[in-house]
Image (tube, rainbow, N blue to C red):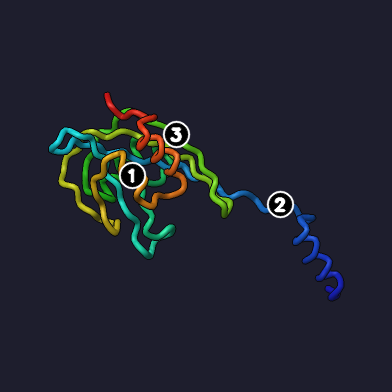
Amino acid sequence: MKKKEAIRRLDARRNGAAGPRPPKALRMVVAALILRTDENGCEEVLICQRKADQPMALKWEFPGGKIEAGEGPEEALHRELNEELGIFAEIGPPLTRIRHNYRNGGAVDLQFFIVRSFTGALENRIFRQILWSGFGALPEYDFLAADLGLIRDLADGKLKVSD
């Protein structure tokens, strides 16, 4: 290949003439709002902080993960909660569904479910830390971008998780 030809091809790619890059795959993800009532009768939700060596390091999130091939959302969430927290959760009703596009071109379809009961003791298996938080305090934590709208709605009381 001649040098001028190689430069033209490189310029064509830079100018988009070679076509757009293929979009990254949409990741199907589930997450749980694990709820409890504190000693004052206020509802709290379990939140988890990613470790420093994970993607989106030290961001807060709700526990859950990727839906694997052949799994339904509830089945995937049940598996993920056992892997991450050592619990066997009773997956409740869906709360909301969010599609989020990240700046790097990736996208996530995120389904949130309510969990009010589980068996087994909570065991932090993969996170930097886990803790219980009231809904009003959620905006104080540095959550993943995909969760921010949900965090605002929960903190403002716009989205109810009550029975």
Q: Residue furthest bottom?
A: 3
Secondary element under disc 1, as helix, strand or loop, is helix
**Cβ–Cβ under 8 Å for marks 2 and 3:** no
Which residue does the image show at 38% across and 36% down from the upper left?
112
Measured in 3D between alpha carbons, the distance from the residue under mark 2 to the one under mark 3, in whole angstroms, is: 29 Å
Left or right of 147: which side holds 39? left
Comparing labels 3 and 1, the label whose residue is closer to the camera? 1
Please indicate, yes or no, whether residue 31 appears anywhere in the rendered image: yes
Report which residue position mark 2 lands on: 20
Which quadrant of the structure image shows residue 127? Answer: bottom left
Report which residue position mark 3 lands on: 97
Q: In which quarter of the image is the C terminus?
A: top left
Q: What residue type is labelled 2?
A: Pro
Report which residue position mark 1 lands on: 138
**Most foreground residue, 140 or 113:** 140
Which residue does the image show at 44% across and 34% down from the upper left?
97
Q: Which amino acid does label 3 sit on?
A: Arg
Query: Is 81 located above or below residue 42 in the figure?
Result: below
Q: What residue type is labelled 1?
A: Leu
Which residue does the image show at 75% across and 61% down from the upper left?
14
Expressed as whole percent of the image width and height from the top left, the position of residue 18 reads 77, 56
Which quadrant of the structure image shows residue 150? Answer: top left
Measured in 3D between alpha carbons, the distance from the residue under mark 3 to the one under mark 1, in whole angstroms, is: 19 Å
Expressed as whole percent of the image width and height from the top left, the position of residue 130 reads 26, 52
Comparing labels 1 and 2, the label whose residue is closer to the camera? 1
Structural crowding at the residue carrying mark 2, measured as other residues with C-alpha within 10 Å and reported as few (<14), some (14–19) or many (≥20): few
How many numbered discs sit on the rendered protein?
Answer: 3
